[in-house]
C-alpha cells in the first residue's frame, strides 16, 4: 500500500495518474497548502523540502520518497512498468522526464506566478516566461511529430509533461499551431487511468479548463496567499 501525500496541482496529479496507471493500491492524504500543512513537522519528516507530492511505501518498510520525478522513477522501477529496462530506453525516458522537471514545470510555474498570482503585473516577466513555455511546447511538438509518445512507448515522461502542459491556458500560453502536441494531449487525456488520476484530489477549479470566472479568481487569490507566505510557492511547482 502506498500513502500519497498530495494536493490538486500538476505535480500532485503526476503521481495519482501514475498510481492509477500502475493499478497500485494507495491512500490519499490531501494537504491544505494554504493552511501550511506541508510545513508541519510530521510532513517534513517525509518531505524535507516541505513540498508535495510525497509517498510512503508501506510495503517497503515505510520507505518515504519526495520530489515528483523521483517518485515516478521509484514507482516505475518498483513495478517494472512505464519505463524500459534497457539502458537506452531508460535514458530516453529520463531525458524527457528531466526536460519536464528542469524546463516545463519551472517555466510554467513562473508564468503562473507572474501572470496569475502576483498582484502587480510585471509585463517583461510575464512575457519572458510565457515565451519560454511556448518554446518548450514547440520542442515537444517537434519530438511528437516523430514519435507517438515522448520516449517511444507511453511512459512516466509522458505523465510528467502532460500533467503540466494540459494547464497551458492557466499559464496564458496557447498550443495553436502545434498539432502533434494537441494530438498527444487529447490521446493521454482519453486514457481511463488519467481521467481517474486528475480528480484525486478534486480541485476547486480546473487549471486545464477554467481560466476565468469567480472560481478561477478565488483559486488565484488562494495561490497568491501561498506565494506571499512563502509556504509552497507555485513557482517551485506546487500549483
Image (cartoon, rainbow, N blue to C red):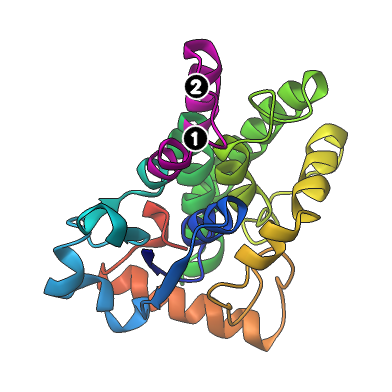
- Tell me how far mark 2 sits from mark 1, CA to CA: 7 Å
Quadrant hosting residue 206: bottom right
Quadrant hosting residue 33: bottom left
Q: Which residues are magenta?
A: 72-97
In this view, the residue farthest toward the front is 59
Q: Is 91 within the magenta?
A: yes
Label 2 vs 1, first from the N-terminus? 1
Left or right, residue 169 beside residue 1? right
Q: Observer-nearest residue: 148 or 87? A: 87
Q: Which residue is mark 1?
A: 80
Q: Observer-nearest residue: 98 or 118? A: 98
Circles 2 and 1 in contact, beta carbons < 8 Å:
yes
Left or right, residue 44 beside residue 147? left
Looking at the magenta stretch, what is its main secondary structure? helix
Q: Residue at x 65, y 57 (%)?
A: 167
> Which numbered tag is attached to residue 42?
none
Q: Residue at x 50, y 33 (%)?
A: 97
Image coordinates of residue 226 in percent, x first then y, are 35, 73
Q: Which residue is mark 2?
A: 85
Q: Secondary structure at mark 1?
A: loop
Image coordinates of residue 111 in percent, x first then y, are 53, 52
Q: Residue at x 36, y 77 (%)?
A: 31
Q: Secondary structure at mark 2?
A: loop
**139 to 77, vertically: above or below:** above
In this view, the residue farthest toward the bottom is 214
Amino acid at each position: 500500500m502506498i500513502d500519497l501525500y498530495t494536493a490538486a496541482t500538476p505535480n500532485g496529479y503526476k503521481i495519482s495518474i501514475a498510481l492509477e496507471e500502475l493499478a497500485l493500491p494507495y491512500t490519499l492524504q490531501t494537504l491544505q497548502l494554504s493552511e501550511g500543512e506541508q510545513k508541519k513537522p510530521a510532513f517534513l519528516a517525509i518531505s524535507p523540502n516541505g513540498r508535495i507530492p510525497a509517498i510512503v511505501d508501506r510495503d517497503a518498510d515505510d520507505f518515504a520518497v519526495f520530489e515528483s520525478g523521483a517518485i515516478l522513477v521509484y514507482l516505475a522501477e518498483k513495478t517494472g512498468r512505464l519505463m524500459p529496462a534497457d539502458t537506452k530506453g531508460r535514458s530516453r525516458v529520463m531525458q524527457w522526464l528531466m526536460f519536464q522537471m528542469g524546463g516545463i514545470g519551472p517555466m510554467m510555474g513562473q508564468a503562473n506566478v507572474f501572470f496569475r498570482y502576483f498582484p502587480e503585473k510585471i509585463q517583461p516577466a510575464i512575457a519572458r516566461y510565457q515565451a519560454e513555455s511556448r518554446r518548450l511546447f514547440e520542442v515537444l511538438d517537434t519530438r511528437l511529430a516523430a514519435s507517438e509518445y515522448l520516449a517511444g512507448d507511453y511512459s512516466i515522461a509522458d505523465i510528467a509533461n502532460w500533467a503540466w502542459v494540459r494547464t497551458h491556458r492557466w499559464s496564458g500560453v496557447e498550443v495553436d499551431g502545434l498539432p502533434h502536441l494537441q494530438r498527444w494531449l487529447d490521446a493521454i487525456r482519453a486514457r481511463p487511468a488519467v481521467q481517474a488520476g486528475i480528480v484525486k484530489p478534486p480541485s476547486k477549479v480546473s487549471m486545464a479548463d477554467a481560466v476565468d470566472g469567480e472560481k478561477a479568481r478565488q483559486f488565484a487569490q488562494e495561490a497568491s496567499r501561498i506565494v506571499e507566505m512563502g509556504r509552497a510557492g507555485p513557482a517551485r511547482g506546487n500549483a
